[in-house]
Image (cartoon, rainbow, N blue to C red):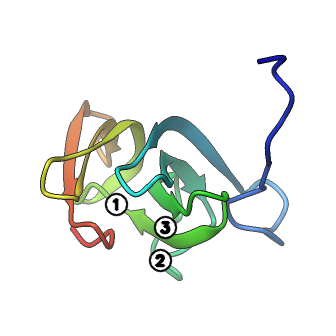
Amino acid sequence: AAGAPQWQELVGCFNLAPGYYTLGVSLQQTSDGGYVIGGGTLGCGLEGTCFSQCGLVEKLDPNGRLVWSRVYKSGGGDRESTINQIRQTSDGGFVAAGSFRDADDAIGAWILKLDGAGNA
């Protein structure tokens, strides 16, 4: 009632090289009492293939501990992608909406459907 923190956790990739980062821009509580976070990352996951920002989804348990973390590219030779909104679906999976920028600098919308374990 007074806004006192109940818990807090740091999530994302750690020990990244200078200039690399992770960010969370969308959060929803899930049906199991946990949380799902959508955002982006530069330098985390997809070893050797994510040279610009990629989409990031992380699933947390009810206490804020990381359950799983996945990095996604929008495909089509993209240069940059990010997740701006993520929601749990009635089948227990997730749907995410975001944007991408391709190698020709074209910008477009990106929709990603995931199962409950984060598999596209």
Residue 67 left/right relative to 115: right
**Residue 114 visible in this rendered orientation of the protein:** yes
Packing grade of label 3 (10 A; few <14, some 14-19, many >=20) is many
Asked if labels 1 and 3 touch by Cβ distance under 8 angstroms, the answer is: yes
Q: Which residue is mark 3?
A: 50
Across and down, in percent, residue 23 comes to: 63, 44
Rounded to the nearest angstrom, the CA distance separating label 2 from label 3 is 6 Å
Residue 110 left/right relative to 19: left
Could you tell me which residue is drawn at 34 percent across and 60 percent down?
Answer: 73
Across and down, in percent, residue 81 comes to: 39, 46
As drawn, 81 above or below 65: above
**Residue 76 visible in this rendered orientation of the protein:** no
Callout 3 secondary element: loop
Rounded to the nearest angstrom, the CA distance separating label 1 from label 2 is 9 Å
Asked if labels 3 and 2 touch by Cβ distance under 8 angstroms, the answer is: yes
Packing grade of label 2 (10 A; few <14, some 14-19, many >=20) is few
Dot 1 or dot 2: first in sequence order is 2
- Amino acid type assigned to the residue bearing label 1 in the image: Lys
Could you tell me which residue is drawn at 66 percent across and 66 percent down?
Answer: 65
Residue 73 image label: 1
Callout 2 secondary element: loop
Across and down, in percent, residue 18 comes to: 85, 60
- Amino acid type assigned to the residue bearing label 2 in the image: Leu
